[in-house]
Image: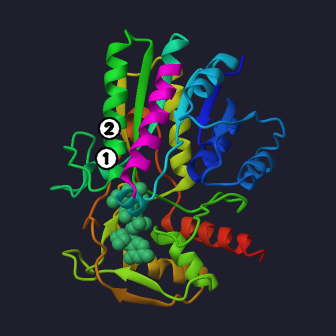
Amino acid sequence: MKKTVLVSGGAGFIGSHVTVELLQAGYEVVVADNFSNCDLTCFEDVKKITGRADIPLEKIDFCDEAAAKGIFKKYHFDAVIHFAAFKAVGESVAEPLKYYKNNLVSFLNVLEAAKEVGGCNVLFSSSATVYGEPEKVPVTEDTPRQPAMSPYGNTKTMCEDILQDTVKASGGTIKGILLRYFNPIGAHPSALIGELPRGIPNNLVPFITQTAIGKRECLSIFGNDYPTPDGTCLRDYIDIVDLARAHVFAVTRMMEGKMKKDCEIFNVGTGRPVSVMELVNAFQKVNNVKLNYKIAARRPGDVTAIWADPTLANKELGWKAERSVEDTLKSAWAWELHLAGK
Ligand code: UFG
């Protein structure tokens, strides 16, 4: 019988790409989402890409404990991947309670529900944000975490601890994997699904594509006086499909009992630092478009440089990021053109 994975937040940017990869790898997927930050289009397009009109969809909010428990009773899950969370750093500073409540309570309910049915494999979507401004780059999983710079970041750190403690107390019934994502960018090669920020994008690549298409007037490059080769910040931009594939390897490892510890942590990055300026130039070159940009002041809270040492994930998961930054930037542009109906 096929193994079934619950993807909470499965209609969002990362969740939808993960759903596609899981289905294509032969897993059954139940998508659950409260559609607070996305609409049905993406889910419908996942059906088109996979040729699966019958993907079960549960419109639920994981902050509703009874609903979370209900879904674990309705299906048997071999693993759950938890994405359902708010993710805007700036908003989390302005509305910390909204972030703590939503991101913590939804995860607590998933874990309670998993516990109530006798346990489950749990994969949590963490972030490189837990490393803060690292003293040494690239960062390995053993690089010490730093105090979070925003309530959003703090919810990632806290959920990591919640999962570790829950696994420890579960007597082996709950196993956990924490994937620490670096900067996911790009879109599915079909150009049918991609990132759909509401309002003004916070992240670099959506801002670039929206500027290139004329939705935004000008991209601001936040600071060119950082102690980096070209003065702009360094990040590890990882293709969204590569990132999604890492989840397939991780859930397979859990289900096949190949974990070396009951709770494991992996960096999901490329190991390749790219500066903001390099990314902007690469976007213009590979897509043959001119971008209106200016150098602006630094953005408060930005770290200077962070990129992954992905050796552990490469070795233990048997996963490696494959797509070049150029191909990923082409996919991001194809997605923006698709949105514009071009
Ligand atoms: N940048 C610009 N102009 C923009 C947007 C971003 O120059 O309009 C720069 C930023 O200053 C940064 C780089 O592009 O140097 C990447 O910025 P993003 O906002 O795309 O990504 P971050 O690295 O800031 O964000 C990531 C994750 C978040 C996480 C955050 C923690 O996407 O989930 O790190 O700092 F919370």
Residue 169 vs 54, above or below: the answer is above
Q: Secondary structure at mark 1?
A: helix
Pick whichever, 166 or 128, lies toward us: 166
* Residue highlighted by disc 2: 158
Disc 1 residue type (three-letter): Asn
Instruction: Look at 39% across and 48% down and name the residue there.
Output: 97
Pick whichever, 247 or 209, lies toward us: 209
Instruction: Look at 57% across and 32% down and name the residue there.
Output: 64
Residue 6 percent across, percent down from the top left: 61, 30
Query: Dot 1, crowdedness within 10 Å: few (<14), some or many (≥20)?
Result: many
Asked if marks 2 and 1 touch (Cβ < 8 Å), the reply is: yes
Instruction: Specify whether residue 236 is in view.
Output: no
Question: Magenta includes 104?
Answer: yes
Instruction: Specify whether residue 163 is in view.
Output: yes
Disc 2 residue type (three-letter): Met
Q: Secondary structure at mark 2?
A: helix
Quadrant in which the N terminus is drawn: top right
Which stretch did the figure color magenta? 95-113
Quadrant in which the C terminus is drawn: bottom right
Question: Magenta includes 210?
Answer: no
Residue 87 vs 249, above or below: the answer is below
Q: Is residue 227 left or right of residue 203?
A: left
Residue 91, quarter of picture: bottom left
Task: Report how far apart the C-alphas of labels 2 and 1 lie in the structure.
Answer: 6 Å
* Residue highlighted by disc 1: 154
Residue 149 percent across, percent down from the top left: 26, 56
- Residue found farthest to the left: 135
